[in-house]
C-alpha cells in the first residue's frame, strides 16, 4: 500500500474550528481502492472529509484517522454524476452547474465534502443531498464494499443508516435534472447570500450548526430564548447573530466548546424539557472531563 500517511499529525490546521490535537496516524487515500485497503488494515479507523462538522479533542486521538480530501474524482455522464467521498461540496456544485445540471445548488455554501454530507444527509435552502441521490458505495467492517440504493440508505432529517450500521461512504451517485444554467447560478447566488446573512464565515472558525433542530422546532430559536447569544466559555462563544453557532473566537479548546455545549443543552432542557442533540461529531477519548460531558451530550455509555 503506497498511501500518504503521517504519524503524530497535528490536525488543528485542517479543521474549520481550528481546534484539535495530535493524531496517532493519519492516512490520505487518493482513490477508492487505497481507501478500501486502509480500512481492511485498520477497520476501526475514523474517517473524515473536510473536517467542517467535526470537533477534535485538543488532547488529540490515540488511533488511526483517514482523511478523504485527496479522493476527489468526479465522473459525469449525461445526467448521472458519480463523486468520490472527498469531493468538496462547493466544487461539485460548480462543476455540475457548468454542465447545466440542477439538484446540488445547496452545496455551494456548505464547506463539507460528499462523504460527510451523505452520512448526515446534509440539507439547506429546501434541498437535501438525498433528494438527488440514487445510490451510495459504502464500506462496512462485516461486509466489505456494499452499494446501497437511496431507499436502502434510510434517509431522514440529518440522518442516514451510516451511523447505526457503522458504514463509511466511499462514493455517491446522483441523478440530476437538466436546467437553464442561469437559473442554477441564480439559486446558488441566493444560497450564498442567505449563508452570508445568517451564518458566520469561516474567517470566524466554526463548525456549522451545533445542534440538530428538534422535530417541529428550531434549535436556534430555543437557544436564543434562553439567552445563548451572551454565553461564552474560555475562547469559545455563541455567535452573536445566530444562537446555534459556536465560534472559536480566542484560541478556544475542545473542552471550552463541549462545556459551552453542555451549558446550552442544560438550559434548554431545564426550560423546555427538550434535549438538544448535537449535530457536530466529536473525536477524542483522552480527556476525562470531555468524556463525562460526552456521556450526557452524545448519550455515550
Ligand atoms: N432563530 C432565532 N434565533 C437565532 C437563530 C435562529 O430565533 O438566534 C430562528 C430564525 O428566525 C428562524 C429559525 O430560528 O425562524 C431557523 O433559523 P435558520 O433559518 O437560520 O435555520 P436553521 O434551522 O438554524 C438550518 C440548518 C442549516 C442550514 C439552514 C438553511 C440545521 C441544524 N441547520 O438552520 O445547516 O444552512 O437551515 O437552510 O438544520 C448546518 O447543518 O451546519 C447548517 C448550517
Image (cartoon, helix red, strand yellow):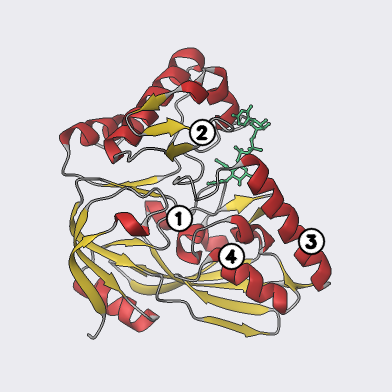
Q: How far apart are marks 4 and 2 (CA)?
A: 24 Å
Q: Does the residue labelled 2 lie within 8 Å of ligand 1?
A: no
Q: Identify residue for label 3.
A: 186
Instruction: Judge depth for marks 3 and 1 and give the one in front.
Output: 3
Sequence-wise first label, 2 or 3: 3
* Rendered location of residue 219, percent (x, y): 55, 31
User: Can residue 179 be seen?
Assistant: no
Sequence-wise first label, 3 or 1: 1
Sequence-wise first label, 3 or 4: 4
The N terminus - image quarter: bottom left
* Rendered location of residue 263, percent (x, y): 38, 23
Instruction: Tell which of 123 and 69 is nearer to you.
Output: 69
Q: Distance between the residues labelled 1 and 4?
A: 24 Å
User: Can residue 294 be seen?
Assistant: yes
Q: Identify residue for label 2.
A: 239
Q: Identify residue for label 1.
A: 161
* Rendered location of residue 44, percent (x, y): 23, 61
Instruction: Judge depth for marks 4 and 2 and give the one in front.
Output: 2
Q: How far apart are marks 3 and 1 (CA)?
A: 33 Å
Query: Which numbered disc covers residue 90?
Result: 4
Amino acid at each position: 500500500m503506497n498511501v500518504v500517511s503521517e504519524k503524530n499529525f497535528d490536525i488543528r490546521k485542517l479543521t474549520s474550528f481550528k481546534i484539535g490535537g495530535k493524531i496517532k496516524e493519519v492516512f490520505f487515500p487518493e482513490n477508492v481502492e487505497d481507501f478500501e485497503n486502509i480500512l481492511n488494515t485498520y477497520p476501526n479507523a475514523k474517517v473524515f472529509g473536510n473536517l467542517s462538522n467535526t470537533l477534535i479533542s485538543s488532547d488529540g486521538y490515540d488511533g488511526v484517522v483517514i482523511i478523504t480530501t485527496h479522493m476527489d474524482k468526479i465522473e459525469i455522464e449525461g445526467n448521472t454524476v458519480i463523486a468520490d467521498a472527498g469531493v468538496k461540496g462547493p466544487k461539485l456544485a460548480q462543476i455540475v452547474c457548468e454542465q447545466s445540471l440542477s439538484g446540488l445548488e445547496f452545496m455551494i455554501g456548505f464547506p463539507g465534502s460528499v462523504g460527510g454530507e451523505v452520512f448526515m444527509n446534509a440539507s439547506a435552502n429546501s434541498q437535501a443531498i438525498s433528494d438527488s441521490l440514487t445510490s451510495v458505495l459504502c464500506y462496512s467492517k462485516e461486509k466489505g464494499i456494499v452499494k446501497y440504493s437511496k431507499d436502502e440508505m434510510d434517509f431522514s432529517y440529518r440522518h442516514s443508516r451510516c451511523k447505526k450500521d457503522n458504514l463509511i461512504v466511499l462514493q455517491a451517485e446522483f441523478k440530476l435534472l437538466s436546467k437553464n444554467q442561469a437559473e442554477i447560478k441564480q439559486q446558488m447566488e441566493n444560497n450564498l447570500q442567505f449563508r452570508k446573512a445568517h451564518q458566520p464565515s469561516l474567517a470566524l472558525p466554526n463548525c456549522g450548526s451545533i445542534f440538530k433542530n428538534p422535530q417541529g422546532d428550531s434549535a436556534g430559536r430555543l437557544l436564543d430564548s434562553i439567552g445563548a447569544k451572551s454565553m461564552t466559555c474560555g475562547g469559545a462563544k455563541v455567535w452573536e447573530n445566530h444562537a446555534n453557532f459556536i465560534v472559536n473566537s480566542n484560541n478556544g479548546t475542545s473542552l471550552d466548546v463541549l462545556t459551552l455545549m453542555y451549558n446550552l443543552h442544560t438550559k434548554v432542557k431545564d426550560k423546555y424539557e427538550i434535549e438538544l442533540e448535537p449535530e457536530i461529531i466529536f473525536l477524542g477519548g483522552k480527556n476525562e472531563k470531555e468524556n463525562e460531558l460526552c456521556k450526557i451530550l452524545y448519550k455515550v455509555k
